[in-house]
Image: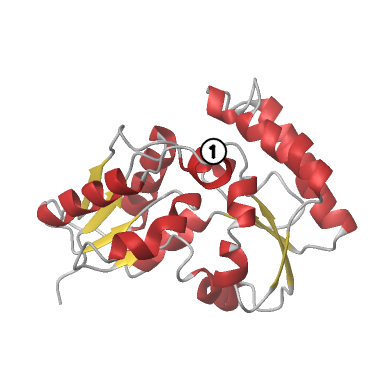
Amino acid sequence: MEPNVIGVLGGMGPLATASFFRKIIEETEVTKDQDHYRVIIDSNPKIPDRTKAILYGGESPLSEMINTAQNLEKSGATVLAMPCITAHYFHEEIQKHVSIPFYHVLQGLDEYLADNFASVTKIGVLSTTATKETELFQTYIKSKSVLFPDQSVQEEKVMRAIFGENGIKQGNNGEYPKQLLKEAADQLIDEMGCELIIGGCTEVELVLGSDDLSVPFIDPMRAAARMLTGR
């Protein structure tokens, strides 16, 4: 059976798209020069901001996302995936316009957690408020209790780390946003009893790593890359 040709639907942020591409490459088994990395990227800069669309009534990104998905299918992709978790708010509508499977980065996460962290019952999520409010994690992680920071910590730590003046969205992947996210994670761990933390948006994994917290830190894009490449 031929392996999948993975179409990465970009336009969600260049660092996130590149990071997802890299993870797919790292999880793909190649043994000789004739093997090829079976992945295509269409990073469409015309896609409007999803957070503004979901939370603030901004311009819808749907038409450009559909166009991007169709371009990837025409280019030979046999499956599609997006690195951005918030963008999956539009998943069902996009799937209507392509004939190939279109995967969430959260699809397979529940199985991954069950296989690797079966004893964990409480997991914390560091995500944008948009992702939190679309309840994607509650939908796709059914085997665990999913918790978020309280509202004040969400705004003062998580959202500032991602969207603030010195946040990740402003090109700062250094110690400032990392420290804010670690402080938010500390609340989840110390006050709420979370045994594992998930990076609930692609920006989080750009600054937090597996050694930064006192509990395991999971990047959903890594789990998705493993699922898509059959690892």
Q: Return the residue at label 1.
A: 206
Q: Could you say which is closer to the camera, residue 60 or residue 208?
A: 60
- Give the residue displayed 24% in from the left and 54% down from the top: 7
Q: Position of residue 148 (x, y in %)?
A: 74, 56
Q: Could you say which is closer to the camera, residue 70 or residue 63?
A: 63
- Give the residue displayed 57% in from the left and 40% down from the top: 56
- Give the residue displayed 62% in from the left and 34% down from the top: 162
User: In terms of image quadrants, where is residue 98?
Assistant: bottom left
- Give the residue displayed 54% in from the left and 54% down from the top: 219
Q: Position of residue 108 (x, y in %)?
A: 46, 71
Picture layout, residue 54 above or below residue 94: above
- Residue type highlighted by circle 1: Leu
Picture layout, residue 27 above or below residue 213: below
Position of residue 215 in the picture relative to residue 39 (left or right): right
Check disc 1: other Cα within 10 Å, few if <14, some if 14-19, many if 20+: some
Picture layout, residue 50 above or below residue 39: above
